[in-house]
């Protein structure tokens, strides 16, 4: 996706996250989605390709998050964390998005 934004001439390309930074990359693509223009000399429909890649990558991220959440739960169980405490942490949005204490 980074290469597509570069090809498109994204004016904020230098702020585009590295490919390893999937979440930040998707946020950037979302922000610039309505501002991309198809380059006249491009054989690739850049804007169309970005719209196809975004939901595909969001799905991949969702699947990775589910797997990582299960791993974290298993790690907690291995050290004696009660299921109720683990469930509370997963459903408490304030805790999920707030700073770690």
Image (cartoon, rainbow, N blue to C red):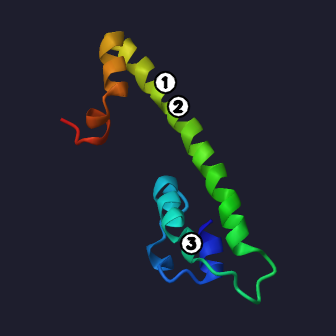
Image marks 1 and 3: residues in contact by CB distance under 8 Å: no
How many numbered callouts? 3
User: Residue 70: percent from the left, percent from the top?
Assistant: 49, 24
Q: Which mark is residue 57?
A: none
At x 54% / y 30%, what residue is drawn?
67
Mark 1 vs 3, N-terminal side: 3
Left or right, residue 101 beside residue 57: left
Q: Are marks 2 and 1 in contact (CB under 8 Å)?
A: yes
Residue sitting farthest toward the right = 43
> In the drawing, does residue 18 fall left or right of residue 98?
right
Residue 66, percent from left and from top:
53, 31
Per the rendering, the mark at residue 34 is 3
Q: Secondary structure at mark 2?
A: helix
The residue at which mark 1 appears reads as 70
In the rendered image, is residue 72 in sight? yes
Quadrant of res 34: bottom right
Q: Which residue is tagged 2?
A: 66
Residue 91 in the image: state x and y as whole percent: 36, 26
Q: Residue furthest bottom?
A: 41
User: Which element is circle 3 on?
Assistant: helix
Give neighbour class at mark 2: few <14, some 14-19, many 20+ (Cα, 10 Å).
Answer: few
């Amino acid at each position: 996706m980074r290469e597509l934004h570069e090809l498109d001439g994204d004016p904020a390309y230098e702020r585009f996250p590295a490919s390893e930074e999937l979440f930040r990359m998707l946020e950037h693509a979302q922000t610039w989605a309505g501002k991309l223009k198809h380059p006249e000399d491009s054989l690739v429909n850049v804007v169309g390709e970005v719209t196809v890649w975004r939901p595909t990558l969001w799905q991949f991220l969702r699947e990775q998050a589910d797997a990582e959440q299960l791993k974290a739960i298993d790690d907690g169980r291995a050290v004696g964390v009660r299921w109720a405490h683990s469930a509370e942490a997963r459903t408490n949005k304030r805790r999920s998005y707030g700073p770690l204490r």
